[in-house]
Image (tube, rainbow, N blue to C red):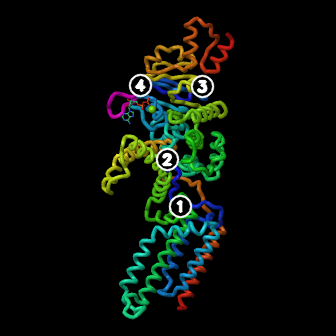
Amino acid sequence: MEQIIAKDLYFTYDKQTPALKGVNFTVQKGEYVAIIGHNGSGKSTLARLLNGLLTPTLGTITVDGIVVGDKKTLFEVRKRVGVVFQNPDNQMVASIVEDEVAFGPENLGVPRKEIKERIDFALSAVGMQDFKRATPSRLSGGQKQRIAIAGVLALKPDVLVLDEATAMLDPQGRKEVLSTVQKLNKEQGVTVVAITHYMEEVTKADRVIVLSDGEMVFTGTPKEIFLKQKELKNLGLEVPLAVYIAQKLKEQGVEIDGDVLTQSDLAEALCKL
Amino acid sequence: MKDVTFGQYYPANSIVHSMNPAVKILLTIAYIVAVFMVKQFYFLGFAACLLAVILITILAKIPFLKVLKSVKAVIFFVLLSAILQLLFNKNGTPLWKGGFITDVGLLTAGFITARIVLMVLGATLLTLTTSPVDLADGIETLLFPLKLIKFPVHEFALIMSIALRFIPTLIDETDRIIKAQKARGADFDSGNIFKRAKALIPVLIPLLISSFRRADELADAMDARCYAGSKKRTKYKKTPFTVSDFFGLVFMAGLIVGVVFLNGFII
Ligand SMILES: Nc1ncnc2c1ncn2[C@@H]1O[C@H](COP(=O)(O)OP(=O)(O)O)[C@@H](O)[C@H]1O
Ligand SMILES: [Mg+2]
């Protein structure tokens, strides 16, 4: 089922050159979509359009059939589409984890007893149930970002949008967040739209959308996208190291079997030689 | 600098810590009133207040030194007012023949010192046993009646709690900027006070700019989580009125009655 439908999206900040110029795409329910593109290609603009933080200049987006950007349905949309931003420090309002997670449901006027349940659910979904009374400023970057995800999950969204949510984290934190998001996608059926420039994260997606200068230039499975190594390079994007090595080896006449996306794929393929 | 705990909250598991912050604030105000109710030179009333402070400190499981340390902050002020009384209070009779210090001067100096010190001790017990977050919460509860005159209590409380939330972040950031500027040869430690103040400008400006960026991003994150002001908002955090609050009220009522009673005796 199509959950997000974007048609001919245009967006212009202060009448300058448009940040998005006619983007069309759909996202299926339960899909894991990665969005990549160079700096300034319009990724964050797109993320903000998805939950009505910005309103399209032209074109439409619908989420579960609800038009985004209409004042009357704004909260219906924001309940459905949760956004996690880049800097964990700048998206927290409370000094205690459980109060932080409670913020969203409080805004919706959820009764106290249900907020309690939602906190427990959201914190265990991100594996932070033991940190209910902790102070976010004492936690690691990865833990903070998981709390931020929990804060969004407490709204029971159908779609989770991550705008470079791992960009400020160390490799350990990035791993924590990535596996949390994958788990939510697989086990809870949450639709994920992950903006990232870590190609290793892209390999986990069902589908990839490549943006360049406000336009969608490619879309396809990670495999299909990584085959376009030259085109990606022209857009200022790299393929994952394992993919690069496998392709170089193929060019040198080494017979690499199957499709290599991750390091373990590569290791397996090399062992078969 | 990372481990700076702002405020002076002393975490412990005690009956005083578990009290409702709003009640604690009210009781602190009641205590200060009690201290001011002690009639001039009726020092027994102060003894009662001191006894109350000692009892609360024991109940709160706080080391006495921690409580006493708070006096350090006002010591200059206390000494100054005491010395002024000793030197310039000309009421009463001189303590020795031709001396410039009078008995009334000495008593007044002692009275003022006791009053300020006891006041500070009481207020310190509040901040030692209540975290800043709980304090803000207590203030919100107490401000609630102002809703009647359309004072934006919820917004005010949110501002307080966000400010508290960002203090550690901003301390970290200040630290980072100072290090970065030092690495570029900035000198914060020499020169007179004006030079040093001027050296802080390259720290404050980046801090200010980044705070604006943070505020922008925070506003987006709050919007994204359906924030829409206080309308139809529920409150998760609840601080019930408990038995310990009841005991606190009785305790403070006892102190006030005690002070009034002791105001009848002079020594
Ligand atoms: N608040 C803003 N005001 C004006 N222009 C902006 C603003 N935010 C982004 N832009 C511009 O819009 C374009 C797309 O930006 P953005 O969506 O943030 O890209 P990305 O997230 O892919 O780096 C850029 O050219 C950027 O300069
Ligand atoms: Mg961006």
Q: Looking at the image, is mark 2 or mark 1 earlier in the sequence?
A: 1
Task: Give yes or no for contact between labels 4 and 1 (Cβ–Cβ under 8 Å).
Answer: no
Nearest to the eye among marks 4 and 1: give it: 1
Nearer to me, B173 or B196? B196
Estimate the spatial distance between the alpha carbons at disc 4 and disc 3, rounded to whole Å: 24 Å
- Can residue B153 be seen in the rendering of this structure? yes
Left or right placement of residue A163 versus residue A1 in this view: left
Q: Looking at the image, is mark 4 or mark 3 earlier in the sequence?
A: 3
Task: Give yes or no for contact between labels 1 and 3 (Cβ–Cβ under 8 Å).
Answer: no
Position above or below: B128 against B237: below
Q: Do labels 1 and 3 share a chain?
A: no
Query: Could you tell me which chain the residue with mark 2 belongs to?
Result: B
Nearest to the eye among marks 4 and 3: give it: 3
- Residue at x 55%, y 67% (from the top left corner): B126
Q: Mark 1 points at which residue?
A: B8
Q: Mark 4 points at which residue?
A: A214
For the N terminus of chain A, give its image quadrant. top right
- Please give the range of residues in magenta: A9-19
Q: Position of residue B64 (x, y in %)?
A: 59, 69
Nearest to the eye among marks 2 and 1: give it: 1
Q: Name the amino acid type tagged 4.
A: Gly
Q: Mark 2 points at which residue?
A: B227
Q: Do labels 2 and 3 share a chain?
A: no
Q: Mark 3 points at which residue?
A: A204
Q: Are marks 4 and 3 on the same chain?
A: yes
Estimate the spatial distance between the alpha carbons at disc 2 and disc 1, rounded to whole Å: 32 Å
Estimate the spatial distance between the alpha carbons at disc 4 and disc 2, rounded to whole Å: 29 Å
Q: Residues within 10 Å of mark 3 (few under 14, many from 20)?
A: some
Q: Is mark 2 on a helix, strand or loop?
A: loop
Q: Name the amino acid type tagged 1.
A: Gln
Q: State the image quarter where residue A176 is shown.
A: top right
Position above or below: B163 against A195: below
